[in-house]
């Protein structure tokens, strides 16, 4: 999934907080497995990240985003499920807030 958003310039944010709320579908009675990679402007913020518990409840994964990734104009955030995934990743909410 990719989300494009606009950053008003000039951007004087030193750091931002990215929150991705997601869950992973369970595999019957077993925990689910759907690692994902999160990128902003092509820079990897997390690689092969898994959701704690492997399903049932949505969790907030919080990332510190360096302000230099927030350049004026269009920015792109990508959340990519791994080819190693054996269950589905469900995205509920994505927020990006200045610190």
Image (cartoon, grey):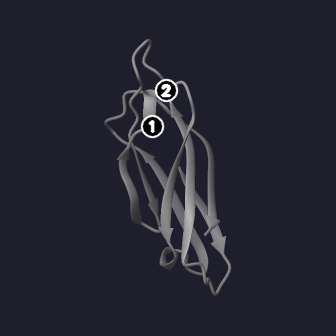
Left or right of residue 28, residue 3 in this image = right
The one of 24 and 13 positioned closer to us in this rendering: 13
Q: Which residue is mark 1?
A: 51
Residue at far front of view = 99
Circles 1, 2 touching at the beta carbon (< 8 Å): yes
Q: Locate residue 72: give its quadrant.
A: bottom right
- The CA span between labels 1 and 2 is 7 Å
- Which label sits on residue 55? 2
Left or right of residue 94, residue 48 in this image = left
Identify the residue shown where x is 55% and y is 79%: 71
Left or right of residue 9, residue 51 in this image = left
Identify the residue shown where x is 42% and y is 25%: 32
Residue at far right of view = 8
Residue at far bottom of view = 10
Identify the residue shown where x is 49% and y is 67%: 65
Residue 5's spot in the image, x, y percent?
Answer: 64, 66
Residue at far top of view = 29
Total number of numbered discs in the rendering = 2
Residue 34's spot in the image, x, y percent?
Answer: 40, 35
Identify the residue shown where x is 44% and y is 48%: 80
Residue 11's spot in the image, x, y percent?
Answer: 62, 83
Task: Work out whether 46 lies above or below 16.
Answer: above
Task: Work out whether 98 lies above or below 34.
Answer: below
């Amino acid at each position: 999934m990719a989300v494009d958003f606009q950053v008003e310039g000039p951007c004087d944010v030193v750091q931002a907080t990215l929150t991705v709320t997601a869950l992973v579908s369970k595999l019957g009675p077993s925990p689910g497995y759907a690692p994902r990679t999160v990128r902003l402007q092509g820079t990897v913020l997390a690689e092969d990240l898994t959701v704690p518990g492997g399903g049932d409840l949505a969790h907030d994964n919080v990332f510190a985003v360096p302000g230099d990734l927030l350049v004026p104009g269009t920015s792109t955030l990508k959340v990519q499920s791994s080819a190693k995934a054996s269950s589905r990743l469900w995205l509920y909410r994505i927020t990006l807030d200045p610190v």
